[in-house]
Structure formats: C-alpha cells, structure tokens
Amino acid sequence: MRRLGLSCFLLFAVPTVVFGYEIGTHALVTKTALDASVLSPSHTRSIVPVLGFNRLDINTPFKALRMSEQFPVAYYDNEPRPVIPLTSEEAPNFFVRRMQNEEGNIFERLRAGNYLSGTPSRVDFEQRIEAWVMRGAIREDDNDVGAYSIGDRDDDPWSAVFRAGRHFYDPRNERALDSLLTCSIFGCVRAIDWAMGRTGSLTGAGTLDTNRENHFSWQDARDNYWWALTYNLIDDIPGASHGLTGQIESDGRKRRFATMLKSVGQVIHLLQDMAQPQHARNDSHGPPVASLVSSDPPSDAAFEAYTELRLFGDVPDDDYYSPLVHFDGSPINVLDVPRLNLRGNVPYPVPSFTTPVKFFTTREFDAVGSRRGLADVTNRGFFTASTLPVNVATGKPDLLAVQYADPPLPAGTGSSFYEIVNVSTELYFQSQSYLRQVLLLGAMPDVIAPNWNAQSGLFAEYGNVGRMPLVAASQLGIASALVPPTPTTENSKFTMSYEVFTAQADAMLPRAVAYSTGLIDYFFRGRLEITPNDQRVFAVLNQGEPHTVDAEGYPRKPDNSIFGFEKIRLKVRNVTDAIVESGPATAAIPQTSGGGTMVAVARYHRNACYQPDMSGERVRGYATPPALGAITEPTCTEGVPSRTNYPEISVSALVTISSAAELPGGEGVAGPAVPIDHVAHLQANFLEAEDAVVRLARI
C-alpha cells in the first residue's frame, strides 16, 4: 500500500527507495483467503471442477499454444465498453500484458519464508491459478506516475494512474481520500467505486463507469469471466483456417480466465485495504520523502513497514528512507518482532452478504454502530497517527475527524472504556526500567463476531478478554503529570506504538482474510444444474447425412458448413445457495434468476481421426462382465495424437430468461425447484467430442 502526497516536481527530482510496503502482506492474505475459498480444490463447494480447472496442468493452466513464442502466459487490459458486452466480437479491444518480476520476486520471498508449502521453486508457482489472484493483489499497488512507476513490470498502456489515491474510503463521512495536495495532482476516487467499476453502487447496482481508469474492477472480472466461458467467434479470423482460429480462440479463453482471476485479486486488495485503519480514516501516508512537501510526518508509513517486517523478518535499512527509523528512534531487534498470525486459535468466520459493496460497508443499511462491512469495523475500531484522540477532538488536521465517535476519546465518559497498563521496555538504566510505556486497552466493537478477539488467543497477554492496545500514552504525555499542562503537552498526550501496531494487524488481518474469502465465494456463487430430459438424450444427429472431412479433420456438409449436433436439449435449474447475511439473524435470501440471458456451452477436444463411416472411433474390446475390455485408440496420422491438444467450444444462441419460472431455484441444492426443459440452438456445431462438457453461462 504505497500512500503518499508529493508535488510533481518532487516526483522527478527526489530518489525513492522504499515502496510497496505491504505487497507481501497482501499476497499472503490473499493466498490464505484462497485456501479457504471455493477456489480451493478441497472446498466442499469448490468451483475448480465446475470450471474444469482440475483438468488443466497445475503449474501452467493458462499457457497458450499458438501465442507461445512471444507471450506464452499473459493477460488482457480491456478498454471499458459503453455497455456490458455479450458477444465475442466485442471482446478483442485489449492490450496484452505479461507476468513480471514485480510479483515473481514476492512469490519467491514467500516461498523462501515457507509460506507456500509444497512449492519447490518460483517457476512452479507463478503461473498457478492461485498465483493469478495473488498477482492481482500485488499489482493493484502499481503507480504509473513519475518516479513511482517502479519495478520490473508493464506500465498502464492507457494512462498514467496513481492508484494509491483510489485506495481510501471513509464510511463514516462517505468520502475518498481527502487530501488537497494528493488529490489535486493525482485525483482521488472512493475505493468502492474504483473496485466496482461503477458509480453510485452503495444503494444498488449503480451506473457503469465507461470512463473508468481501472480495467481490473469487479465489472471487468465479470466481463472476462463471461468471455472465458463463451469466447467463440462466429467467423474465422481473416487469413486463418478454421482450425487455427479455434486454437487462437482457445488461447484467448485461457487469457480471459487469467484476466478474470487477476481482476478478482485486485478487487480483494482494495477490500483488504479497508482492514488498514489509515485507509478507512482518511490518513494519508507515505515514505519519509513525502514529509518534504506534505504535512505527513516521516513516520506515517511505519505501520505498513512494521507489518511487512513481521512477515519477512527483514530489518529495513537504517537510513532516511525507512519510516521505522523515524517512528520512535530506537533500533529494532528482529528477534523481538512477533511474526504475523492470520488465524489465531480459531479462524474469523467468513462473512456473507448479498452484494459485493456490503463487504466494504453496510452504510446504507445500518446505523454507525451496527455496520458490518470491513471498512466500518476498522473505521470505528482504531486510532491512527493522524487521528489520535486529540486530533479527533479538535478536528485537526482533518476537519471531519470529529465525526469519528469510536473509539471513545480517553477522557470524560470515554475514560471508563479503557484499562491503563504499564509495559516494560528494552531500555534499562542501572538494572531499573529506564523508560516506561503506558498503553490504553479497549475492546473494538464487532457486530459479526463480537467475541472473536477473546477467542482468538491473539491478545492473551492482555487478559484474553478481547481488549487490546488502541493507543499509547506518549512520553511527553506521561511527563505532563509532573509539570503544568501546556498546549504542547495537551496536544501530544497520545501516540502509536509497536504494541498498538501489532494489535491492529493481529485484529484486522484475520478479518481481511475472512472478508476476502467471502468476496471470492460471492463472485463464484452462481451454480446451474444440468440434467437430461425425460428421454435421457441431450442431442440427436443424423449420421447418414452426407458430409466429408477436410484437411484439418473437421466434418463438412456439402455447403461447407460444419456437420454436427445443431441443438441440444436439457433440463436446467438454479442450484445457487441462498444467502444468509452475517450479523443479526435474518431470513435466507434466495438467489433467484429474475431476468437475464443464458447460453449453453459445449467444450470438447475433437477426435482428430473422425471419418464419416465411423472407422476412426475408439473401440472397446469385449471382456466377461463385470470386467471391462481394453480400449483401442484410433490412429489417423503417424505421430499425431487422436485427441486434439486444445479445447474447442460451441456456443448456443442466446436464451432469454424472463422470470424465475424459466430458471427455477436459488434456494440451494436442496431446494424444491423442478428443472425446466430448454432447447439451445448451437451457433457452431460440434461432433466427435473427447471429454465433452456441457456448461451453462448466465449474465
């Protein structure tokens, strides 16, 4: 999370050494979330076999065949369209972008730190399905502005974007980052709008932002998901044969899957930012160089630097560019730094909501104290360097900080909220503690899991009752008890400390994992069940219709069109689970269809040995039951496999769904809905399918 506010001249004049403080933390949080989500093969409702991911090579699932020479593994960067696109012909407006060392180096550091179990090398991991989501979580911190366009990566091909100005959202005051300097130079957007690719999404679906600079939003993830399932051109690519077109389409679908997963990763990066108090309380922060031209003190980035230190155990350089050097002036002994713990004794429960925005905030549905989004929990649960109690009380430097009612100010009625404890330090003089630290403990409110902090065991040293350090008394504040109060001592009573930083991360990173898991599960929640009709037949073909086989192995009718199945008939119902929102007990909300568009997709590998007289078929020999005879594979061309090495698809014409009666269900697998018989007319016929799978896609 690189957060800074600098003028343009400084961007090009001052060397910048320390950036990307938390991309390692983002990557690990994302990996932990993935392991608990439906993208894990071990999940009871895993999407992996549904999408056919389990049939792909584990290390190179999306490696292209025809595009392998220049870009063997890549993803797309789409220009936003004026409407949500459906046809494949609307998809090709893109830039192709490649994997880079920016994320590869993080994968290697995580592997070396034993965070990627069972991964022998970076090469074995960086193309995997989970790596694509992690890549998005890492690359969302790309800043294509001057000296901040750093790392071994592709710059944004459309425009120079300072993404950091889009990573803040204050749900209490309903605003993006409110920093005159940063926002006047780079522009600032609410994180929820940047994440969704829409405006006005708090109260409903919102309005599609067709001018969005973020091409890896929730909307882009959905668009690429559709294309990954359905991308199939009506006409062959000019100058390419039908077979070559099919291979290029297959490669394109692989890249669409990669783009979809990367976009999901970038959205959950923004959700994870909401677990960092500075991002939910309008507290801009950057490396020490930012202090040269802004009001941010050099230590403002200390929380993120300290969290990354807890992850990798690397002590930052003792120089001006390390925010930890400026934090309290004392050197850090890495042996005393606690490692990150993203689980605790029990995992934080995975939240469930009916819209993606609710994972960020339920501002439009709940009172302040009852809000359940991740930004809501963080905003009311913690102080930050620029929103310490005295700053909140005075509204300085942020005028709207006075709206932060929680945590309570440690004065007046709020004083009963805190327990004051003394903490020994590493500094001694003549065998006596030389420096005393005073911490103010409180219990952050949480509507979804109010007892989790106590159950987690992460705060056992503070009594294991849910209290944690929310703020520390400054040394000046402690000394003020010995001298008459002055404006300086009154305004400097409180500070952050490493103990407070540790508590913030221990409390919020497990929540970031759980909310990220919940958002991934929500994205892949839709399930349609396909069963045969009453005749138990999906399709019928007149094999005696005249046809020949062309040089590429495709069966052709006399008019040169493809010979094969032209329509399929099947029963379908919606088996998507109903959603019970997290928080106070509410009724389950069925995920019924309403209106929409559905297509049938047949995905298959062709039998390259097909002949009209059926002589090129696989043959199973006889064996006495219950034994099965051996299968004899056909041989058509010496050294050429009978099964094509790339999948093809046939996509039906659009089927309009007008109401839930035409696609019943949505109450879950156990729902009472009866499947409805549908006929889907295929736009591209298919025949001789090896490992054929019929899928339904709906948008």
Image: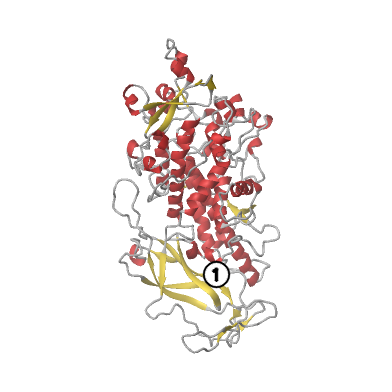
In the image, 647 versus 620, the foreground residue is 620
Who's the residue at 32% across and 67% down the image?
673
Q: How is the image coloured?
A: secondary structure
In the image, 521 versus 176, the foreground residue is 521
Mark 1 surroundings within 10 Å by alpha-carbon count, few (fewer than 14), some (14 through 19), many (20 or more): many
Outermost residue, front side: 431
- The C terminus - image quarter: bottom left
* Vertical position of residue 443 compared to residue 122: above or below: above
**Residue 639 screen position, x and y as percent:** 70, 77
- Left or right of residue 534: residue 66: right
**Residue 389 screen position, x and y as percent:** 42, 25
**Residue 604 screen position, x and y as percent:** 55, 72
Toward which corner of the image does residue 244 lie, by quadrant?
Answer: bottom right
- The N terminus - image quarter: top right
Who's the residue at 64% across and 66% down the image?
237
How many marks the image carries: the answer is 1
Q: Which residue is mark 1?
A: 649
- Left or right of residue 620: residue 404: left
- Left or right of residue 579: residue 96: right
* Vertical position of residue 387 compared to residue 640: above or below: above
- Residue 80 at least partly seen: no
Who's the residue at 49% across and 85% down the image?
627
Outermost residue, top side: 484
- Residue 410 at least partly seen: yes
* Vertical position of residue 313 compared to residue 215: above or below: above
Who's the residue at 55% across and 76% down the image?
689
- Left or right of residue 349: residue 300: right
Question: Quick one: SS at disc 1?
Answer: strand
**Residue 665 screen position, x and y as percent:** 34, 64
Residue kind at label 1, given as amino acid type: Ile
* Vertical position of residue 91 compared to residue 543: above or below: above
